[in-house]
Amino acid sequence: MASASGGRRSRSVLLVALLATLLAGLPALPAGAAAPDRPPAGRVVPVDWSDFDEGPPAGEDAARLRAILVNANRYALTTWYDERFAGQGEEGLLDLGGTGEHDIRPVAAEAFALAAALATGAYDAEGTGVTEARARATAVRLLTSVAGHHRANEAAGWGDAWQSALWAALAGFAGWLLWDDLTPAEREWVRAMTAYEADRFRGYDVPYWKDRDGVEQTPGDSKAEENSWNAMLLQVATAMMPGHRHAPAWRQANLELMVSAFARPSDLGSREVLHGRPVSRWVDGWNAEEDGLVVNHGIVHPDYMATAVQNTHAVLTSALAGEPAPRAALHNFDVVYAALADREFTSPPYAAPGGTMYVRGSDGIYFPQGTSWGPSRRMDFVAMDVVARDLRLDGRASLGGAYWERLHAGRALAMQQRHADGRTYAPEDADPYAGREEWVAMHAGWAYLTRWLVHQDAVRITNRAYPGGG
């Protein structure tokens, strides 16, 4: 990846990007966001890997999580890569096919999952059938292709879109994890992409499902998922570039997005102090019901409740930066988790047979009003279980995260074991999302990295007030 031709390619892409910026100016921003200044040169502080010397987490449960991640890596490095990028050779930026979600997000997700495995020592060359050197080169090519094609680095590139912060968070995090493997030009692509997307949220107007009066602003569509994935990008940016002159504003936007993501009606009057101000002063509406239920696609939706794990992404980035994670990342997670485990639904009016979304003694999930993505998804719930267990956020639930993790992760692994290439889904598994395999890999990376960092005794939480902002 560090060949002479790669260096020439890097300089060429950067020159094209600079010329395009001078000619066209900065692109449009989302409503309510301040126009960013030209990104300043913010130094990236690499992860100090010498701080993480405890080795891999032990035990059957950790081994199961690692096996899921290894299987996802095997599929990515073989069937997925070979089919998606057939005929594109061994050098240069990959042609991602376009600038939309299904062009960028899957590639960023696989890059992150590979980077998480490589950085933690979970990567298994025997299990994937691909050498570590080859896997590392592939991960770098994936993440640098995503970053290099961002509009901060390439004329008419992707970015500045509704979901682009999530894609940049995944690729940026992957780049940070594999920083030592990047050329100077590739590092600059990652830095510029991350800073550009973070600057979109300076002065951002945080959206809510319901306003202070309980009036739906986005009918049937909670902003829990959206706010938490936007926060993910800001977490990556502040962890990588803590001294950036915009970092104080990024931190404040991150805090507001995390508190708002699963805010409940009672938060509007809450006197609990988070990061120097009452919760009531952080929020201007709510995105979850009082009991932790989340409505999306017009229904009570367990899959969107499970996006609470996106807030706890801050625990991962903070731990790797050697800093305590903001308590805002945990806000209302325990309430949402308890609702998954214990909220009872009576049939009718809810779907037969009724009961709780997590089903005792079963690896199944009950969807009280149906689901947009089919009943086969498990890795989002596995990630929730791991976070609830390892961060001790399962105290409100009648059964703890360890109990549910073993059931749900057991199902996820069994689904993969049906296939020689490590893929999760079979034709009979209903999930219409085009990026479902990459979605599995992303969650597997989050789950294993959480377990690994807790094992390293690297996780701390703070409720400090952060300076600056605005």
Image: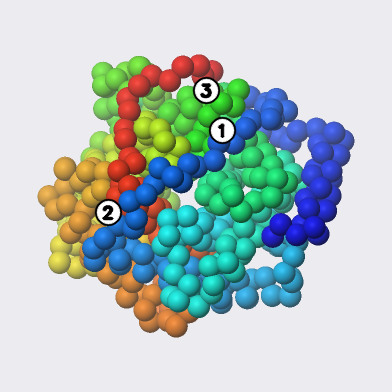
Residue 287 sits in quarter: top left
Q: Is residue 213 above or below residue 103?
A: above
Instruction: Describe the element under mark 2 as helix, strand or loop.
Output: helix
Q: CA distance from mark 1 to mark 3?
A: 11 Å
User: Which badge, 3 or 2, is on the more N-terminal residue?
Assistant: 3
Q: Which mark is residue 397?
A: none
Residue 224 shows in the view: no
User: Which badge, 1 or 3, is on the more N-terminal residue?
Assistant: 1
Residue holding disc 2: 385
Type of the residue with mark 2: Asp
Type of the residue with mark 1: Met
Q: Position of residue 455 (x, y in %)?
A: 29, 50
Residue in the image at 33% along x and 40% along y: 459
Q: Which residue is nearer to you in this view: 21 or 298?
A: 21
Crowding at mark 3 (Cα within 10 Å: few <14, some 14-19, many 20+):
some
Residue holding disc 1: 241
Q: Which residue is nearer to you in this view: 299 or 427?
A: 427
Residue holding disc 3: 248
Instruction: Describe the element under mark 3 as helix, strand or loop.
Output: helix
